[in-house]
Amino acid sequence: MPTKSQNEASNIGSLLRARNNLIYVVTPEEARVERYLFEACASAGYTAVTWDCSQGVRNMDGSVSDLIAKVVDPATGNEVPNTDLTAALVAVAKNAGLDISPYETAPAAQRRVWIMRDLPAWTPDNPLGIETKRRLRNLGRALSGVPRERAQAIVVITPVADLPADLQGQATVVDWPRPDREEIASILDTLVTQYNIKLNGAREAAIDAAVGLTGEEASNCYARSLVQTKTIDPGIVSQEKKRIIQKSGVLQWLEPIEGGLKAVGGLDGIKSWVGKRALALFSPKAAAYGLQTLKGILLAGISGCGKTYVAMALGAEWRCPVVKFDFGALKGKFVGQSEGNLRKALDTLDSLGLCIVVVDEIEKALAGATQGAADGGVSADALGTFLSWMNDRRSKAFVIATANDITSIVNNAPELLRKGRFDEIFWVDLPTAVERVQVLEATLRKHKRTVAGVESLVDATEGFSGAELASLVPEALFTAFADGERDLTVADLAEVAKQVVPLSVTAKEKIASMRAWAATRAKSATTPDAPAAADKPVPVRAPALDLE
């Protein structure tokens, strides 16, 4: 089965055969993509040459091309260096048999593709780039009518799709994909063969650990592992992958919660839902049966009740990466940089395979996108692109968005709540009595402590959020430590609880408003407490009848 890059190379070959003479290839992987471009050019009957501002025009084997080796400027009589961009563009025209000045170059009747690495620096959207852009536009118009045997095309490699407005009508833009699993496997197998490495059954894990990286990043991760351990250690590769992903600034790697969903107190509604639908992710029969790919869930509710925590625990449960998407980190100081950051982040998420994408407090991103155009519409465009990606993606990325203020979403962007964006919307309320005990017990296990009688704290912690409950344990540990380093007791926890003013008191009206909305519009994240015995209806007994 062809890899994504092989399919894209075939697409480039088709574009060349269709006489598309100006193609922009968006990729940060210059060296890897050029190898595929050389193959695409050959398949379409073209000879490829490269140009950059340092080495000038080079043949595919790296030797200096003689196409513009000796170009003389008639105005000055001086020889124009091989690195001159204008000389290179004139050479394109001369090779096509077009008579344009100012330079004289020897025409050569050969079909060529000119792969240009640094061209975007000469085409800014300001007067400094007007001459180069005009030359490109003229070339684009003239090359379309050139005879087949002299056909020429320009392929521009750029890390960011900052295509000038002047060229958008003539250029074809191709977003080159990151290596898929098959290509990563090929990179690994090459290293294994070259260095005679024994993987001892860790091949699949080593491939999975590098999925989502560029080809060069994957090679560097494997190389680091080789230097440190003399083999390919998936753990080392994963740690290096974490560092590389965080380097982007837009995506943040979150460590999964040890113990998975068992470490989460309560929220049985969410646990049941994801447990049932995990079959659609891991069962090969799911697609054949007709089960749809999961998109994600929106967790709306009170702050500090475990919304982000359950996402991190789910990563451990599903054994997949958990990545936080930060809308605030998208914005760049240069025009087009924000769009490039977003495209790169979404491309990374698509290439990660199965992963959990956490969008924390999505209502804040929505507010930035709907409250005017102070940032030139960047926030609105970014949000629109992200929502479109959520709708149309075919990857296995599972989005978990959290919102502390659901009314803000209702007022600013109700379209986020429509069916199709998320598979389900959950309301995460304050922990019930049962859940409060579970949260305390889970927190005690995390701190390697056992305390008898935490059930007695149910009334004392009424209205506490999960975060407020979890804070009781470390605070009580300080008390026990200061009192002779003794064992923690339930009395210590009760004393700390008396000092807490919960959010349910300080934000009582706001919480009531959100509960009213969620009552008929969201699925409960937990099972309500059973009514107390005194509240249960007394069964009606049939009268005793004397039937004798």
Image (cartoon, rainbow, N blue to C red):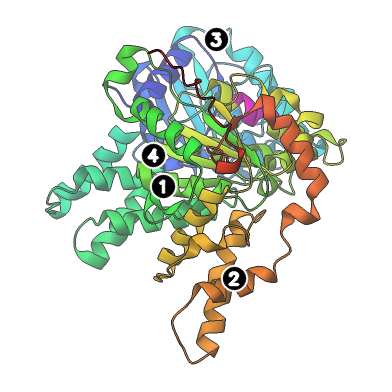
For marks 3 and 4, the one nearer the N-term is: 4
Residue lying farthest to the bottom in this orientation = 484
- Residue count near mark 3 (Cα–Cα under 10 Å), binned few <14, some 14–19, many ≥20: some
Name the residue at 71% across, 59% down.
502
Q: Nearer the viewer, residue 282 or 372?
A: 282
Nearer the camera: disc 4 or disc 2: 2
Q: Nearer the viewer, residue 457 or 367?
A: 457
Name the residue at 61% across, 28% down.
90
Residue stretch rendered in magenta on the structure: 384-388
The residue carrying mark 1 is 261
Query: Whole-Å distance between the Cαs marked 2 and 1?
Result: 27 Å
For marks 2 and 1, the one nearer the N-term is: 1
Question: The residue under label 1 is which amino acid type?
Answer: Leu
The picture places residue 111, in percent across and down from the top left corner, at 44, 18
- Residue count near mark 2 (Cα–Cα under 10 Å), binned few <14, some 14–19, many ≥20: some
| Secondary element at image label 2 | helix
